[in-house]
Amino acid sequence: MARPPPRPPCAAPRESAPPRTGPCRRPPSPAGTGGTSPGDRPPSRERDIVTASKTTSAPITPLTPTLLRVAQHLAHGLAPKDIGAQTGLSAETVRQYMRDIRESLHCPPRCKPPVMVHRLFATQQVAVPAPDRPAPQFSPEDLLLLRAVAEHSNPRNVALAAKLAPADLRAALDQLLVDTGAKDTTQMVILAHGWNLLTAEPTRVGASQ
């Protein structure tokens, strides 16, 4: 009678792993399985800041021929109501064109004509008219106020940029209008550009005056 084959030896019992003493760390879950993947993380503040800076530094949109004609009237000191009378456009149409120019130049929505004119010249959308008078002598404080008027619409911001007390702004502006012979702040900015006082390097220009 044949003997049955011998049974294989039993495997040695597995040793149990020692208990963990540190915190249990779960491996990162892949995207779509309940974990948070890099693409699912909320945007960081650093990324928001980078995006915002790219938006504000975006190139301007060149003006259309229609907007350019309106901008040229602005560059010669015409107020919006005078542009309507000069061109035969309705007041509402002129207002819409002004909004379109602001948007194309990345100006604040309700900025005043001096700021728009400064931006038009700074971006070379229109030519600067030749001044009809020589430049007077300006102090460093005068040059600071000129630039503040060209870059800000809110009186408080103008005073802050010019390093003036808000209560002193009106008197300082009135004196600057007298010194330049300008009828208003828009013409003052136009003249300042004609005198090369509002270039990209105000410190060097101011020092040369």
Image (cartoon, grey):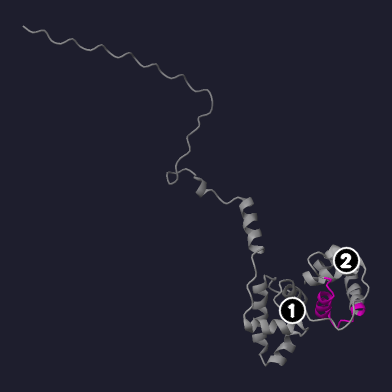
- Give the quadrant of residue 110: bottom right
Q: Identify residue for label 2.
A: 206
Tell me, yes or no, if residue 58 can be seen here. Answer: yes
Kind of residue at badge 2: Gly
Q: Identify residue for label 1.
A: 127
Residue 198 percent coordinates (x, y): 81, 70
- Judged left or right of residue 87, residue 158 is right
- Judged left or right of residue 15, residue 59 is right
Q: Residue at x 71, y 71 (%)?
A: 123
Residue 125 percent coordinates (x, y): 69, 76
- Give the quadrant of residue 22: top right
In the image, residue 98 sits, relative to residue 161, either above or below, namely below
- Give the quadrant of residue 86: bottom right
User: From the image, which quarter does the N terminus lie in?
Assistant: top left
The magenta segment is 178-197
Question: Callout 2: helix, strand or loop?
Answer: helix
Residue 101 percent coordinates (x, y): 66, 77
Residue 148 percent coordinates (x, y): 82, 68
Question: Callout 1: helix, strand or loop?
Answer: loop
In the image, residue 55 sits, relative to residue 20, either above or below, namely below
Q: Residue at x 81, y 72 (%)?
A: 149
- The stretch drawn in magenta includes residue 195: yes
Residue nearest the observer in this picture, 67 or 158: 67
Identify the main secondary structure in magenta.
helix
Asked whether disc 1 touches disc 2, contact meaning CB atoms under 8 Å apart, the reply is no
- Judged left or right of residue 69, residue 128 is right
Tell me, yes or no, if residue 164 can be seen here. Answer: no
Kind of residue at badge 1: Ala
- The stretch drawn in magenta includes residue 83: no
Disc 1/disc 2 C-alpha distance (Å): 22 Å
Q: Residues within 10 Å of mark 2 (few under 14, many from 20)?
A: some
Residue nearest the observer in this picture, 152 or 66: 66
